[in-house]
């Protein structure tokens, strides 16, 4: 009897240590980002960094504004997640409510394979296939323009398309699990009241699964905000106002592009960029936790 109690205590201690390591990792990362990201905010000024649109760290009159970079990250993320959410929810409904076992298994396998493709492959396909196609569209639309700067297809529109495809597997997987978890009693009650299958799906099952669906969307936002490699390959890498046919640079690609050769204040500001990105992602997660608590109270 004592040996069983000892084993249980050891297992409890291991589980507690595992949970503690996760909390410690989050706290350590948070502290590190604050320590490394705040000196530039104090030296250059938070207002100058966050609200100035000019980025010229190596110029004689250096400027470290990331307003356009923040806007580019926000706009590309929001639009790509909206596209992925619409397609993802419809695909999840198909997998959960309409597709048969064989077809559903085939589509689900394709979604899982989509999730396993490395980011660099998305970037490579976007660069070799999407960029030329969008460049053709760009030439058609701006053939007579004397002010438009052609990007060769490497612009925000291409970045949004690539991000949408990359976010899709996350939204589909979480939303499908949520729809599958919805009680069959809801479906039977809806049918008993005379509702059709489509009415039952979109007026009963989907609303009942909204907590899980929103979780998938929020995770998709985190994926889109944190993506660097693929966007660095297809977005052009220039600091511009986030318009569809403008080359853009996001928070992640900003760090990836310049960290290797930066030094001094330039390097410190890049850590501040990382801090801004970290705050965005933490804010999104806090909103998700708040929403879950609200749903649990209901």
Image (spheres, grey):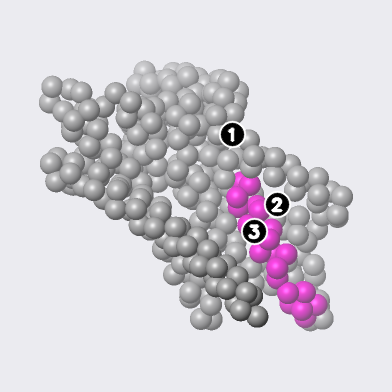
Q: Which residues are magenta?
A: 168-190
Q: Secondary structure at mark 2?
A: helix
User: Image point 18% across, 30% down: which residue?
Assistant: 264
Name the residue at the front extreme. 2
Residue 103 x, y percent position in the rendering: 84, 48
Pointer 3 residue: 175
Label 3 sits on a secondary structure element that is: helix
Q: Which residue carries the number 2 mark?
A: 91
Residue 118's disc is: 1
Q: What is the quadrant of residue 187 in the picture?
A: bottom right
Image height of 31 relative to 151, above or below = below
- The Cα atoms of the two marked residues, 3 and 2, are separated by 9 Å
Q: Considering the numbered disc 1 on the image, is that residue within a helix, a strand or a loop?
A: loop
Label 1 to label 3: alpha-carbon separation: 22 Å
Q: In which image quadrant can residue 197 be found?
A: bottom right
Q: What kind of secondary structure does the magenta stretch mostly adopt?
A: helix
x, y percentage for residue 266? 22, 31
**Residue sitting at 51 percent across and 38 percent down?**
160
The image position of residue 202, as x and y in percent, is 69, 66
């Amino acid at each position: 009897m004592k040996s069983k109690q000892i084993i249980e205590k050891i297992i409890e201690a291991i589980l507690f240590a595992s949970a503690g390591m996760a909390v410690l990792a989050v706290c350590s990362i948070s502290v590190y980002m604050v320590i490394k990201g705040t000196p530039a905010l104090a030296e250059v000024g938070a207002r100058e960094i966050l609200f100035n649109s000019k980025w010229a760290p190596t110029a004689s009159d250096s400027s470290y504004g990331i307003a356009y970079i923040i806007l580019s990250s926000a706009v590309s993320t929001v639009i790509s997640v909206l596209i992925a959410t619409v397609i993802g929810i419809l695909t999840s409904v198909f997998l959960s409510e309409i597709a048969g076992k064989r077809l559903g298994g085939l589509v689900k396998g394709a979604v899982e394979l989509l999730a396993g493709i490395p980011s660099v492959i998305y970037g490579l396909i976007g660069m070799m296939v999407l960029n030329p196609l969008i460049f053709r569209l760009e030439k058609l639309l701006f053939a007579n323009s004397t002010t438009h700067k052609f990007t060769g297809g490497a612009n925000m529109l291409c970045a949004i398309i690539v991000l949408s495809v990359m976010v899709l597997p996350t939204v589909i997987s979480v939303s499908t699990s949520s729809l599958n978890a919805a009680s069959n009693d809801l479906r039977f009650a809806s049918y008993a009241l005379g509702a059709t299958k489509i009415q039952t799906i979109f007026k009963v099952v989907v609303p009942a699964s909204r907590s899980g669906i929103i979780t998938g969307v929020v995770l998709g936002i985190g994926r889109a905000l944190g993506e660097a490699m693929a966007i660095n390959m297809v977005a052009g890498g220039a600091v511009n106002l986030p318009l569809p046919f403008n080359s853009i640079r996001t928070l992640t690609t900003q760090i990836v592009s310049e960290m290797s050769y930066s030094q001094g204040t330039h390097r410190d500001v890049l850590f501040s960029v990382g801090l801004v990105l970290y705050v965005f992602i933490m804010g999104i997660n806090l909103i998700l936790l708040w929403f879950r608590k609200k749903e649990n109270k209901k």
